[in-house]
Amino acid sequence: MNAPNSNDHSHRAVGPLPEGHPTVKQGKIGVLLTNLGTPDGTDYWPMRRYLKEFLSDKRVIDTPRILWWPILNLIILSLRPQKKGKDYASIWNNEKNESYLKTITRDQATNLQAFAHGLDDRIIVDWGMRYGNPSVKSRLEALQAQGCDRILMIPLYPQYAAATTATACDKTFEALMEMRWQPTLRVAPPYHDDPAYINALAQSIESHLATLDFEPEVILTSFHGVPKRYLMLGDPYHCHCYKTWRLLRERLGYSPERMQISFQSRFGPEEWLQPYTDKTVEALAQKGIKKMAIIAPGFSSDCLETLEELDGENREIFMHHGGEHFTYIPCLNASDNGMQVIQAVMQRELMGWI
């Protein structure tokens, strides 16, 4: 007996509808890629809107609101939009007038749609941002309007953190709360130890190093930081980062001295996960390390924290303290390696639906 073709069940029959019944669209399967977000522009007001939405999220800043609101609205949102706007402007995609995070996430969705069409022509791939545009709510509604009664959400965060994966889920569930006919939802789990992800990272490192005219003495794996307190409260992010680092080292055959780990982008006065990236880069240079590379495995797309902070600020720190050769290894982005990871996650999590 031949296996049924996907086309045989591309639209589940709903039977005859009574006169005047609204059009029913169903039988499609949505895949929604979600990423952190981006401002709509680099000027003061777009930056302020973005920062206000981001820094108002209790998953990101859990300080009691009575203390945090005056600091946020009277100080941070008065001063920080100008500074961050200049940072974004330094790595802005001027051709498309958008951040590279938005450009790359769109490319990932486009490439995934082409791949998904070969699996099952019922699959519709879309993408949305937790903060800024396009919003998660608008893309969920768009998928439902196209007949997607089952949706797989893939948060593009390899390592789970409440401030990333959980808040993306929060926004998704908020949107579902307003829908009369909710689609069935699946959320892809973190893939910090997925062999496809580890292998893709290793191949990207090997390919990049092959293009250099020097051999890095140290390769620093830099993950986005969170307050240490979050770890103590039970967030598994720290453990996920360390497991990714260990598996990647083992795959490449590097010692902990050759491939080190650090955490970047700390904000505010409290202690964050250590060692800190900027302090580690400075210490390496001061110890006599002349050649180093940095990779950011926790970011699925290059963005402000990689292009401006790592390849800009930390490059300057290293060279200023005696370093001579520095290279930044790009994120997986929409490369063949990167797409293989997202494809593997999608195929696994759609089992039973296709």
Image (cartoon, grey):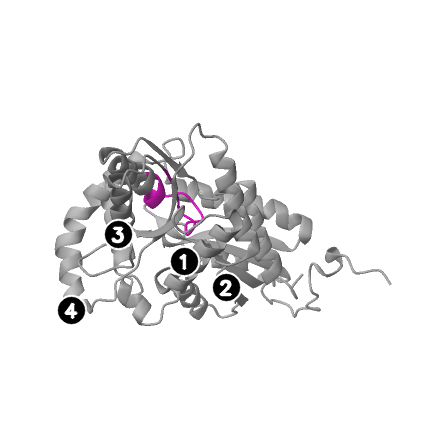
Label drawn at residue 155? none
Dot 3 falls on a residue whose secondary structure is helix
Q: Residue at x 30, y 70 (%)?
A: 232
Marks 2 and 3 sit apart, C-alpha to C-alpha, by 27 Å
Give the secondary structure at mark 1.
helix
Residue type at numbered disc 2: Pro
**Residue under pointer 1:** 241
Q: Are marks 2 and 3 in contact (CB under 8 Å)?
A: no
Q: Nearer the viewer, mark 2 or mark 3?
A: 2
Q: Which residues are magenta?
A: 292-307
Residue 226, picture quadrant: bottom left
Looking at the image, tell me whether mark 4 or mark 3 is earlier in sequence order.
Answer: 3
Q: Is residue 205 magenta?
A: no
Mark 2, residue position: 189
- Residue at mark 3: 51
Q: Residues within 10 Å of mark 3 (few under 14, many from 20)?
A: many
The percent position of residue 242, horizontal first and vertical second, equals: 41, 59
Of callouts 3 and 1, which one flags the residue occurring earlier in the amino acid sequence? 3
**Up-down: is 144 above or below 215?**
below
Kind of residue at disc 1: Cys
At x 17%, y 52%, the residue is: 76
Q: Is residue 40 visible?
A: no
Residue shown at 33% from the left, 43% from the top: 304
Tag 4: residue type? Answer: Ile
What whole-number distance in Å separates the C-alpha atoms at marks 2 and 4?
34 Å
- Is 318 situated above or below 123? above
> Quick one: 312 or 127, which is closer to the camera?
312
Which image quadrant is residue 212 in? top left
Residue 301 part of the magenta segment: yes
- Give the residue at mark 4: 66
Residue at point 72%, 61% (across, down)? 9
